[in-house]
Amino acid sequence: MRTRFVIAIASLAALLTLDLGAQPVSDAQLVSAYRWHGKGEHFGGFSGLEVSEDGKKFIAITDRGYVVRGLFDRENEVISDVRTAPLGPLKSPKGGPFGRFRSDSEGLASHMDGPIFVSFEAKHRVMRFGGIKTKGRALKMHPDFKGLQNNSSLEALAIDHAGTLYTIPERTGVEGSPFPVYRLPAGSKTWEKPFSIPRFAPYLPVGADIGPDGKFYLLERHLSGVLGFTNRVRRFDITPDGFKNEVELLRTPVGLHDNLEGLAVWRDNNDNIRLTMVSDDNFKFFQVTEFVEYVVLTPSPDPARPAN
């Protein structure tokens, strides 16, 4: 017990001494934390999430190559129940489930009513599926993809309103180096690497989305030893010169939530941006699957400043 306590204190001390960045933190408020209980050997490990514009429907993928559609029930804007169809496997180009070393699906991007795009680790790639029950097709890879780390590659994937894809690896292979942003313009077959985003230890990218405001949202996480997980969400303006005007929207206390990996951004009935996240329980009995929602409050007008 003494040894475990010492390890926990050391983990917390290490976290507090790291460079977490100098971005301002906004007024993001926790509004919902719902434990999702499912059945069957394929339930768990949720790594990617998309939510409809009205916040009622969702698609989620697991890191073992399974996908599910579902509905949120809410009471007073808080998730009260989750209803889903059965989990089913993503289909390989041959029509069957992916093999063991090709099924590590991590990032999800979709407009909900069209094709879905999924990024994979191990065999680093992004694939397009016409629907959750159709065969997938691998997109042409960027030359960098082959050299990405085995279990730390294309975790974050997002799509904008025009159909341009963005993906970011979990690790760069060089400690402290910025995270490269890979972009596949709508209608193009060639990935670009136009810019990067700053890296602040100890957080690593695990999910992304582009919100209804056209901004890029990045979910990051850190495992602080036996103390549990801490997560961060950063927001960027998308400009021709890269991701600019970085703002840290959320940084959770260690152990407050489980391993949040999937992120979806939408606007609720109060016209506030809502961050919906899902946790990856790693198929471990001591972890949980949960949906977590934060509201990013819209700043009130400054009463001292005259309206234009």
Image (cartoon, rainbow, N blue to C red):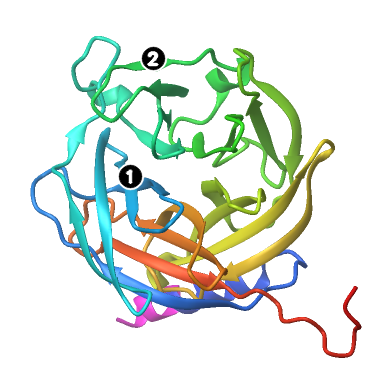
Part of the protein shown in magenta: 1-7
Give me the residue at 30% from left, 64% from top: 290
Report the magenta stretch's main SS.
helix
Taking the magenta stretch, the answer to whether it contains residue 76 is no
The amino acid type of the residue labelled 2 equals Arg
Residue farthest to the left, as pictured:
40
Mark 1 or mark 2, which has the lower sequence index?
A: 1
The tag on residue 161 is: none
Element under disc 1: strand
Element under disc 2: strand
Taking the magenta stretch, the answer to whether it contains residue 6 is yes
- The percent coordinates of residue 50 (x first, y second) are 41, 47
**Quarter of the image with the N terminus in it:** bottom left
In the figure, 253 relative to 150: above or below? below
In the figure, 261 relative to 139: above or below? below
**Quarter of the image with the C terminus in it:** bottom right
The amino acid type of the residue labelled 1 equals Ile
Q: Which residue is mark 2?
A: 137
Instruction: Compute the Cα span from label 1 to label 2.
Output: 19 Å
Give me the residue at 36% from left, 34% from top: 105
Q: Residues within 10 Å of mark 1 (few under 14, many from 20)?
A: many
- Which is nearer the eye, 224 or 230? 230
Give me the residue at 90% from left, 84% from top: 305
Q: Which residue is mark 1?
A: 59
Q: Is residue 99 left or right of residue 268?
A: left
Residue farthest to the bottom, as pictured:
304
Q: Answer with the quarter of the image where residue 159 lies.
A: top right
- The percent coordinates of residue 20 (x first, y second) are 68, 65
Can residue 190 be seen? Answer: yes
Give me the residue at 10% from left, 44% from top: 41
- The percent coordinates of residue 251 (x first, y second) are 57, 70
